[in-house]
Amino acid sequence: MRFTDKVVLVTGAGRGMGRAIALAFAREGAQVVVSARTESRGAETVSMIEALGGKACLVGGDVADRAAIKGMVDGGVDVFGALDIVVHCAADTSRGFIIDMPDDTFDHIVRSNIQSLFWLAKDAAPHLSKSTDKGRLIFISSGEANRKYTPQLIPYGSSKAFMNAFARGLAAEFGALNILVNVVEPGLIGTDHMHETLGQDLPHALAANFPVPRLGRSEDIASAVMFLASNEASYITGTSLLVDGGATMVNMPKIDAALKAH
């Protein structure tokens, strides 16, 4: 019960990694502020937490919307009276070649994956700074930020590279505010959304080339987040924890061959 009496806001908690993170915190005593763009999915996460005997509230909204982010932070504080930890998991993963991508699609990626970082950090910092044992701001990035090139993912990978750089700078600035800032970089995680984006067969074909030859699980990411949010990580800030089964160490020709085969 490492997080008893702590209040945690998790964006993108309606399913996949975000839901797994929210449930992991609830199991260890945290009060969870669930943010989800799709209200029904967020409500389901809240129900799952309550079934565990935990406390949760739903604050909906799209992280691409400035007002929605302020509502997430203020709503959680209104219900639970504080905010100790923020985990930003929501993101836009739209795929496409740059030459074919509509302007509004790219704009939404920028707002969801880049501008949301600024808005969330700015709104949450005054509350996180009051946390005992230091506030935590944890961004869910992607191993894609470290890859040379994956077809149709240039905007997404670039936005995650920005996230990593933003978090490092923020860690330096927020240190004086009693806040630790870190990043978790998932590899290929077998979520519903990932299969909707890449299909059922391609992810397994790619993962077969990894040093740990399987898809990652949402619980793998939740475990990394729990560590960085815990007292065991009280001397860690400005770092990125790569959780990808060794995917970024694989020779690109192997990945390219798997992509071309599908």
Image (cartoon, rainbow, N blue to C red):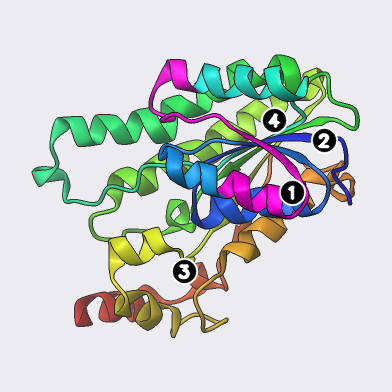
Residues marked 3 and 2 touching at CB (< 8 Å): no
Estimate how packed mark 4 is, as few (under 14), some (14 to 19) or many (20 or more) residues with alpha carbons within 10 Å: many
Secondary structure of the residue carrying numbered label 2: loop
The earlier-in-sequence mark between 3 and 2 is: 2
The earlier-in-sequence mark between 1 and 3 is: 1
Q: Which mark is residue 46?
A: none
- Which of the 4 image quadrants contains residue 166? top right
Looking at the rendered image, the disc whose residue lies closer to the viewer, 2 or 4, is 2
Residue hosting label 3: 190
Secondary structure of the residue carrying numbered label 1: helix
Number of labels in the image equals 4
**Magenta part of the protein: which range?**
45-68
Residue hosting label 1: 25
Q: Residue 208: x and y, percent?
A: 44, 85
Q: Residue 129: x and y, percent?
A: 79, 20
Query: Which residue is painted at 39% across and 22% down in the image?
Result: 65
Inter-mark Cα distance, 3 to 2: 29 Å
Q: Which mark is residue 6?
A: 2
Q: Which mark is residue 171?
A: 4
Residues marked 4 and 3 touching at CB (< 8 Å): no
The earlier-in-sequence mark between 1 and 4 is: 1
